Image (cartoon, rainbow, N blue to C red):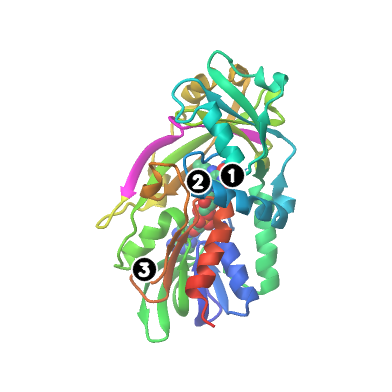
């Protein structure tokens, strides 16, 4: 059960965003509790993802997202250095057909945003089927180890004195005289506390809390995603590959398991749905009950056309998670943050970062909107 009856801030969701925000607020001297329904921090999207620290290359159709990635990359890799994995070469390839950008456009765009880019070595380029791939570039992009990242943010929370309530699910919020009243369910039973401000950092579950509280929902698009975990062929052991920009694939190191993820634009999303004004699906409950039949065979067949050695990869497992994006990102594949202050209730803020390094954009917005002098 929570230790106090009133807090300055109650943060819902112990993913990377909730945990960093909670530690920042505690460091600033506020009384903060972080409620996470799982048994540990960062077990959901902050663990199950492609582990890419974006540096702009992924967004040749969204200048703003590409530039924000370029700005955040050095800061993120410096601040979270012990969790950064950089001992691999990163190749981006552009096929002749079906790509929304040509190799020349890709190269020019990266030069424009100042992202380091050069032609890949002959040896690396020869990994690809050059009858299908127009050009292969050598780029600077790293991966993060989410388990190491969790260790860093947990340490910060402990030092800052954030109260951490694991296995504690926030059920609903409502207006109260001294802020917001919060109902929760913890191992010791049901409880109720108040907080001056509540931050809803629950990613795919943002609308679950809003809906259960009778508050207006936010338009969000969800996908049930599968990334295959593979033992890569020897040639790819120290290489990460992304083929851009269309119905292609990425094969990236996944540091917590010492394997690579393989994801494919066509086969990684199994089902998608949208929460809209009047209705939403409980994404996690739905996730738990959804059938999860691997599409690895399709993924590897489609990807190995471009990168033949992938056919020798060995699938060890699959990682499944609900991926949530803003519907407006569909057209240009951008990744802005969601930041909704006073969502149906004064003091209730909903925050979702489309990618890990967006934490800095969220912190800036938070300072601007929520910090009272
Ligand atoms: C398949 C996939 C690939 C991705 N690839 C990348 C990538 O390569 N690079 C990148 O930067 N980003 C990537 N992302 C995006 C990135 O993972 C997310 O932006 C980030 O992890 C979101 O962090 P979060 O803290 O908002 O969400 P989460 O980590 O999901 O945290 C939300 C937390 O809220 C908890 N919660 C939910 N409801 C309640 C409740 N009622 N009470 C208490 N707790 C609750 C959940 O248990 C969860 O721990 C990817 C995402 C997916 C799914």
Q: Residue 214, image x and y in percent?
A: 29, 67
How far apart in space, not on screen, are marks 2 and 3 (Cα)? Answer: 29 Å
Q: Contact, CB < 8 Å: mark 1 with mark 2?
A: yes
Please give the label number shown on residue 113.
1
Q: Contact, CB < 8 Å: mark 3 with mark 1?
A: no
Q: Earlier in the sequence, mark 2 or mark 3?
A: 2
Q: Tell whether position 107 is magenta.
A: no
Please give the label number shown on residue 63.
2
**Predominant secondary structure, magenta span:** strand
Say if residue 237 shows up in the picture: yes
**Front label number (2 vs 3):** 2
Q: Residue 47, image x and y in percent?
A: 58, 48
Mark 2 surroundings: few (<14), some (14-19) or many (≥20) residues within 10 A = some
Q: Is mark 2 within 8 Å of ligand 1?
A: no
Q: Nearer the viewer, residue 223 or 141?
A: 141
Q: Contact, CB < 8 Å: mark 2 with mark 3?
A: no
Placement of 92 over or under 188, stated as above or below: above
Say if residue 53 shows up in the picture: no
Mark 1 surroundings: few (<14), some (14-19) or many (≥20) residues within 10 A = many
How far apart in space, not on screen, are marks 3 and 1 (Cα)? Answer: 35 Å
Q: Is mark 1 within 8 Å of ligand 1?
A: no
Placement of 318 over or under 129, stated as above or below: below
Mark 3 surroundings: few (<14), some (14-19) or many (≥20) residues within 10 A = some
Q: Nearer the viewer, residue 94 or 347?
A: 94
Q: Earlier in the sequence, mark 1 or mark 2?
A: 2
Mark 3 lies on residue: 343
Q: Residue 113, image x and y in percent?
A: 59, 44
Residue depicted at 41% across the width and 59% down the height: 206
Residue depicted at 56% across the width and 78% down the height: 3
Residues in magenta?
A: 259-274
Number of marks in the image? 3
């Amino acid at each position: 059960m929570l230790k106090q009856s009133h807090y300055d801030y109650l943060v819902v969701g112990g993913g990377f965003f909730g945990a960093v925000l909670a530690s920042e607020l505690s460091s600033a001297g506020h009384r903060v509790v972080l409620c996470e329904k799982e048994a540990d921090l960062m077990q959901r999207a902050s663990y199950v993802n492609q582990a890419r620290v974006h540096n702009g290359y992924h967004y040749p159709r969204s200048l703003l997202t590409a530039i924000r990635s370029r700005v955040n990359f050095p800061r993120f890799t410096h601040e979270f250095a012990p969790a950064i994995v950089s001992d691999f070469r990163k190749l981006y390839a552009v096929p002749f057909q079906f790509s929304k950008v040509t190799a020349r456009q890709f190269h020019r765009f990266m030069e424009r945003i100042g992202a380091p880019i050069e032609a890949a070595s002959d040896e690396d380029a020869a990994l690809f089927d050059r009858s299908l791939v127009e050009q292969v570039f050598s780029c600077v992009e790293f991966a993060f180890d989410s388990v190491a990242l969790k260790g860093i943010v947990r340490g910060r929370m402990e030092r800052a004195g954030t109260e951490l309530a694991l296995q504690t699910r926030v059920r609903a919020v409502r207006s109260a005289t001294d802020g917001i009243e919060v109902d929760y369910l913890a191992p010791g039973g049901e409880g109720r506390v108040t907080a001056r401000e509540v931050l809803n950092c629950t990613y795919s579950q943002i609308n679950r809390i809003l809906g259960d509280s009778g508050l207006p929902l936010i338009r969000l698009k969800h996908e049930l995603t599968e990334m295959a975990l593979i033992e890569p062929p020897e040639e790819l052991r120290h290489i990460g590959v992304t083929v851009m920009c269309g119905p292609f694939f990425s094969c990236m190191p996944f540091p917590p398991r010492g394997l690579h993820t393989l994801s494919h634009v066509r086969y990684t999303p199994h089902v998608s749905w949208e929460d809209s004004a009047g209705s939403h699906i409980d994404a996690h409950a739905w996730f738990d009950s959804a059938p999860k039949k691997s599409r690895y065979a399709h993924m590897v067949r489609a990807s190995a056309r471009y990168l033949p050695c992938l056919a020798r990869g060995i699938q060890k497992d699959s990682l499944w998670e609900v991926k949530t994006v803003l519907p407006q990102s569909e057209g240009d594949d951008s990744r802005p943050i969601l930041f909704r202050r006073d969502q149906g209730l004064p003091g209730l803020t909903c925050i979702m970062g489309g990618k890990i390094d967006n934490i800095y954009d969220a912190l800036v917005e938070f300072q601007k909107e929520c910090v009272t002098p």
